Image (tube, helix red, strand yellow):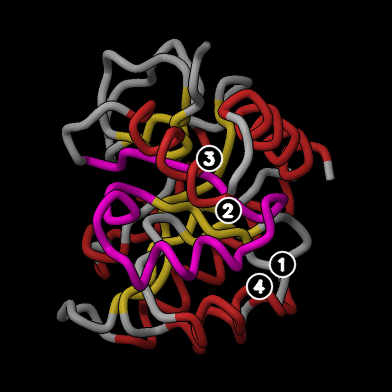
């Protein structure tokens, strides 16, 4: 059985969504394209968006990762302008949005009203109340390696509806199959059923 890796940084994984780095050449498998908050170049953000727009090909599954980060030096107002532009591109090309969020969840939620496409928080690793607020606002949550050992996050995952979940390796070095096995155990369902549900979720965010 093959297991879809929703967000990864490895060229040797073709069954998943590869996170394209700024100005990197295009891979021959599904990828997401965006400007990570820490990569924003205030003086040349227009050329960054030209790069983004000109590389949205048939293999482009999603826009991102993009979002808001409360721990970096890029001014919040600039981050928000860039994030809003990503949402507009996502709307225009009808592609889901993969979101990086650090300490800015309620700000990210405030942008939900202008988005017409699915919004997925990647690498979700926060408390139940934040998960509840995101789910209430129709976000999807993508979980990674911490689910293997973080009991509090395991409890969050147990309460997250199956049709709102994705699984990812991000830039961690481990086998995605371990994560699928753990989640199927936590959810009390077979690996086959979990796998099928993730594929249905992919179909939903891609075609609405």
Q: Residue furthest right?
A: 208
Rendered image: mark on residue 184: 3
Instruction: Please tell me which of labels 3 and 1 falls first in the chain.
Output: 1
Residue at left offset 19%, top offset 40%: 172
Instruction: Please tell me which of labels 4 and 3 falls first in the chain.
Output: 4
Magenta residues (range):
144-171
**Spatial distance from mark 4 to mark 2, Cα to Cα?**
15 Å
Rendered image: mark on residue 97: 2
- Quadrant position of residue 164: bottom right
**Spatial distance from mark 4 to mark 1, Cα to Cα?**
15 Å
Rendered image: mark on residue 135: 4
- For residue 51, say whether it is visible: no
**Spatial distance from mark 1 to mark 2, Cα to Cα?**
9 Å
Q: Are marks 4 and 1 in contact (CB under 8 Å)?
A: no
For disc 1, the marked residue is: 115
Rendered image: mark on residue 179: none
Nearer to me, 168 or 29: 168
- Reply yes or no: does residue 146 show up in magenta: yes
């Amino acid at each position: 059985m093959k297991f879809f890796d929703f967000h990864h940084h490895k060229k040797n994984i073709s069954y998943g969504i590869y996170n394209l780095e700024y100005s990197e050449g295009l891979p021959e498998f599904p990828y997401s394209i965006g400007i990570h908050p820490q990569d924003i170049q205030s003086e040349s953000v227009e050329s960054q968006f030209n790069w983004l727009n000109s590389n949205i090909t048939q293999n482009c599954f999603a826009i991102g990762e993009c979002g808001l980060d409360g721990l970096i030096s890029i001014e919040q107002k600039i981050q928000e302008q860039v994030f809003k532009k990503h949402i507009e591109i996502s709307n225009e090309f009808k592609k889901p949005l993969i979101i990086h969020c650090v300490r800015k969840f309620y700000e990210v939620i405030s942008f939900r009203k202008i988005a017409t496409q699915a919004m997925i928080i990647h690498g979700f690793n926060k408390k139940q109340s934040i998960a509840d607020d995101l789910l209430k606002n129709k976000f999807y949550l993508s979980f990674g390696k911490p689910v293997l050992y973080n009991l509090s996050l395991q409890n969050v995952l147990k309460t997250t509806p199956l049709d709102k979940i994705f699984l990812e390796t991000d830039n961690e070095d481990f086998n995605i199959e371990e994560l699928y096995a753990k989640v199927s155990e936590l959810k009390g369902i077979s690996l086959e059923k979990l796998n099928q549900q993730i594929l249905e979720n992919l179909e939903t965010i891609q075609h609405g």
